[in-house]
Structure formats: structure tokens, C-alpha cells
Image (spheres, grey):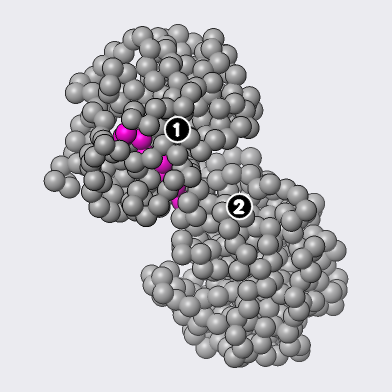
Amino acid sequence: MHPLHKFLLFHLLASLGRNADGSEIINGELAPETSMLYMASLQDSTGRHLCGGFLIRDDFVLTAAHCEPRITHVVLGTHDLKRVNADNKISIERKYKHESYENEGNGNDIMLLKLSRKARLGKNVKPIQLPNTEIKIKDKSMCNVAGWGFTRTGGEAVEGLQEVDVPIVNLEVCKKEWKIDPFNLPANVLCAGGYGTKKGFCQVCFLSIHKKINEASSSSQGDSGGPLVCSGKAVGVVSFNKGANCDYPDAPNVYTDVSKYLTWIKDTLKREPQEERQVTCRAGIMHPLHKFLLFHLLAYLGRNADGSEIINGELAPETSMLYMASLQDSTGIHVCGGFLIRDDFVLTAAHCEPGITHVVLGTHDLKRVNADNKISIETKHKHKSFRNEGSGNDIMLLKLSKKASLNRRVQTIPLPTSVMNEQGNCQVAGWGATRTRGAVDDLRVVDVSIINLEVCKGKWPFDLPDNVLCAGGYGTNKGFCQGDSGGPLVCRGKAVGVVSFNKAGNCKYPDAPNVYTDVSKYLTWIDNILKHYK
């Protein structure tokens, strides 16, 4: 069968009754608050529930690939979506959709979400185990599926987590019931519920996949992406079903078989996806793959990026550093730092891009944020050659949706006018920890010394990217750690660097300097973007 024919037939079935992107639990019951502590609600920037998912590690959620469009954060630690707050929301840093996924009908409907911070495991949040090896579950074994959504056809959506027991359906029987020539079930799936029973999952959104992706107004409210749990392990991911009225006695519900993707999951947990592993470096010095592996091994062992905090600094005076910007996600969580270089542009690091929706200007105290000092981000201009911090070009311009009002609380900072060779003491500032694991809401500043670039290169065990500066974090306990990547390195009143990465497990890091993007090497790139918005 031609792939296009299969695709068209699959989505014809969708319009006739096969549903995805939000399946609801039918004829279930409220899940006890002390159960299913791995459940995650995947939401968009407005706080609207789109899909389910489940925590498999303190920083990773597993879900369905077709849930990818529009989700910005996850909610953990509550069964009641009316009880959502900043404490139980975590923004999504990266989405790892299976590389072979095209649509649910072709299979590989699985995705990993890297969270922007680790979930706090406790009495309300715990990960769920996956199978250790490929498994075959006995027919008619009773398993469990859960989600937020409708409890019956034509009913009203509920915000309390619902669960239901469903029997495993023999795969050959399932294929037979789904075989509508020339459509066949994809490989690597499980079937359970929705066949000769009124229990399973359903859905309220009957738009085709194309329309759902292109129209953010589609009305999905449900739980594709949630787990099928058998004997305490997540063996399946809710993918699709057939049924507009949720009675669907003629075709079983279909789940992605997690056990068939264990290698993919383990590989993803260990490293970045393929497109971020193609690191360029000077020929004859280090193989790109070796550089990639070493860089991320250091990250695992203690090199931190995506937000560095100021270590052993002091509170910045309210009348200083009026160019500082806090880059935040839709929940108001501080993700990165940045700095105002024109009344409508903020400069920051490219690796800060995922999840940020607005900037806060005009305050050093993030407890004093209000509508007057928040400005949404209109466009993100990430350097086109950026792949990851270790490859360099870690720089990004943010076009604001309106001009900032320049006044006694908000000012811009000048950039260098030409390539500079800085020496001596400079400053770096940011919001975050003042010591390992000690977070604060007030802007802090610290003096750091510029480190000779050749000395810096000699202290790092891989080739540093081009166009960087080094300062602090070497033979000193002052510098940055975790919380404010994207902030400026300021020398003689000019922003000469952008916080990029460091090597730091405990924020004492005496063995390798902190690394900044050298702003002076990107002046032409910056000017060209600013000219488009004159």
C-alpha cells in the first residue's frame, strides 16, 4: 500500500470516528489522590489541558508524539486541574518526538519531554517504571488507563483524574477488527478496551491532524499520551481509537507498545537528538562526535547551562543594571536572563529559547512582577548556526511585542562598537542561587576577572567553540552556576559577553573558567536584524 493512500485512509477514518489528540476516560471513576502519582497534564500557554503523559524520571515525561503541537508545560502532583499553581507547573525544555513518526496511523506515536527543571519527588509526585525488556502481555489481562476528560458520551468534561480497568485484547483479533482494506494497524502497538465493552478512552475532537496542527482553536480536551499500566508498569501510551460516540464496540483502543521503544528511550535519556549532535570543530583536532560526547558527559557530571546563578555575589543596587531582563515562561517561572539593547530588543543566549514567552523589565525583585513590567516576545531570532552550547553561536535576539518605556527603572546597555580584547575585572549579574541549591528572587551581581583565552582553552578538556570569552570560575569561587544563562558580561559599561556555559557540579568549580559568547564577534548579525525593525 502506498504511504499516501494509507495516510489518507487513516484520516478519513478519523473524520468518521477514529479519534486522537485527547482521549477521555469512559465509564471510569475518580482516581484516589494517593495513586497514579506519575500522571502529568500537558498544557498549552493558556493553561488548557491538551494531553496526558507520565513521569519516568524526575526530568522526563513520556507521552504520544501526536500531542506535540502547542504544549508548553506539564502539571504534576495534583489530580484536580483546578488546583494548578506555579509550584506544580514545569515548562518543557525540549521535545523528543520519535524520528519516524508521521501520524498515528503509521505508528511510532511516542515522544519524550525534557523538563526545564527536575520535578520534586515526594508524597504527591513519583515516576513510574517501564518494562525492562520486550514483553507480551497475556490476553484478557486487566490493566488500567487514566486521564482527565469526559466520563460519558455527550457529558461534560471533568477536571478530576479518572481511571478505568481495561482488558488486553489479542493483537491478531485487534488487527482483524481494524482491518478495513487497505488500512492495517501499525507495528509496535498494543490493544486494550473499547471492544465489546463500554470502558476505555474516547475523545471530543474530530478534526483531522492537519487541521489540528494548523488551527490552535481545535477543541481537544483529553488524554492521548497517558499510560496503559499493567502490573505497576507503564506498558503502553494512549494513541488512537475508533468511535465518535464512545460506545465503539467494534474496534479495540490502540496504544504504542512501550517495550518496543526501550532502546530509543534509553538513548534519548542519555544524549541530545541527532540534529543537535552534529557539532562542528576545527579539522584534525577532535572528531565532532567525540567532542559532542565529551561536552555532554561534562554536562552530566556538572557542567550547567540553560540558566546560571550568581555565586558569592551581592544584591545589585536598585539604581544599577537597569537593562537586566528576566526571561520567563507562560507560568511566570524565571528561565534565563537577558539584557535590553534597544527599546524593543533583548539580547540573550540561543539555548534559552524553549519555553520563554515574555520578559520582565524594570525590577530587581521577581516578587514584584505585574502587568506593567511584563512584555510578551513577538519573535525569536536565534542564530542560524546554533546547535548547542558546545558548538558555539549561542546568541539570540528577542523582538518585543511593544517598546519598553525607558525611564528611571528601565534603560538599555550599549554594545561594543568593534572587536574587543578585554582585560581586567568585569561584572556578571542574574537571579537565582547564591550558593549550591540556594535560590533567591533578587538580582545579584559579582565581579569576575577576564581569563586569557589560550589559558581558558587549556583548562577545558575539549576544544572550545569559536567566538567566546572566558571569565570567572577558575581559581575562584565567584561566577555563575545555575539560573541565568543569557545574562550579560559587562566590562567598562558595555555588554561584551552573553552567559553560555560552565563546568560546575557544586558551584565551586575551580578547574575551568566560565564561558560567554563574545558579543563583539556578532555585531554585524545583530545590526542586520535590528535594521529590519527600524
**How many numbered marks, from 0 up?**
2
Q: Nearer the viewer, residue 271 or 212?
A: 212
List x then y, in percent, for residue 375: 33, 51
Mark 2, residue position: 87
Check disc 1 and report the residue beneath it. 443
Residue 447 coordinates in the image, percent (x, y) = 43, 17
Circle 2 Cα neighbour tier, 10 Å, few/some/many (<14 / 14–19 / ≥20): few
Judging depth in this view, the residue of 378 and 435 nearest the camera is 435
Is 29 positioned to the left or the right of 496 in the image? right
- The mark nearer the N terminus, 2 or 1, is 2
Please say whether residue 324 is one of the residues in the magenta stretch.
yes
Residue 523 in picture, x, y percent from top left: 23, 29
Q: Amino acid at mark 1?
A: Leu
SS state under label 1: loop
Q: Is residue 210 left or right of residue 166?
A: left
Q: Which residues are magenta?
A: 322-329
Image quadrant assignment for residue 134: bottom right
Checking the image for residue 288, the label placed there is: none
